Image (cartoon, rainbow, N blue to C red):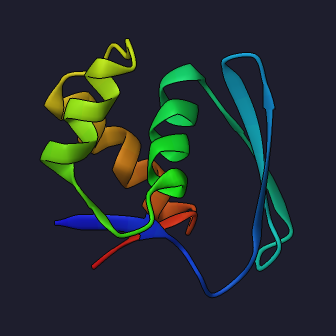
Amino acid sequence: MKWKIYRSFPIQFVSFGYESVAFHHGSGETHYLDKDTSLVLSIISGSEFAISEPELLSIFIDSEGNLDKQSLNSVLDQLCKLKIIESI
């Protein structure tokens, strides 16, 4: 499965050190994102093309992240439910 930023509504991100806040213009909701979630989102949003889970995990580990595959899937699921990212 590949992941990309949800494009139906603009989403704004503000980072505070290792954490960030995302404002979703479609829902009007603001979401606090912890360190690992912020890093995953940063990788996805910085990718020109949709990014696969193995690529994402490899980049995450190279960025000194601390997630295993199961935890990564949990983060991706959370971001997908918030309609911040989508799978293709």
Which quarter of the rendered picture does the N terminus lie within? Answer: bottom left
Left or right: residue 73 versus residue 86 is left
Q: How many marks?
A: 0
Residue found 55% across the figure and 42% down from its top? 42
Quadrant in the rendering for residue 35? top right
Looking at the image, which residue sits at the far front?
A: 48
Measuring from the top left, give residue 76's x and y in whole percent: 36, 49
Left or right: residue 87 versus residue 86 is left
Measuring from the top left, give residue 56's x and y in whole percent: 27, 43
Q: Is residue 36 above or below residue 47?
A: above
Q: Nearer the viewer, residue 39 or 86?
A: 39
Residue found 38% across the figure and 17% down from its top? 65
Measuring from the top left, give residue 34's x and y in whole percent: 61, 25
Left or right: residue 24 versus residue 51 is right
Q: Nearer the viewer, residue 79 or 56?
A: 56
Q: Nearer the viewer, residue 34 or 81?
A: 34
Q: Is residue 65 above or below residue 6?
A: above
Measuring from the top left, give residue 52's x and y in whole percent: 20, 57
Quadrant in the rendering for residue 28? bottom right
Residue found 75% across the figure and 75% down from its top? 10
Quadrant in the rendering for residue 21? top right
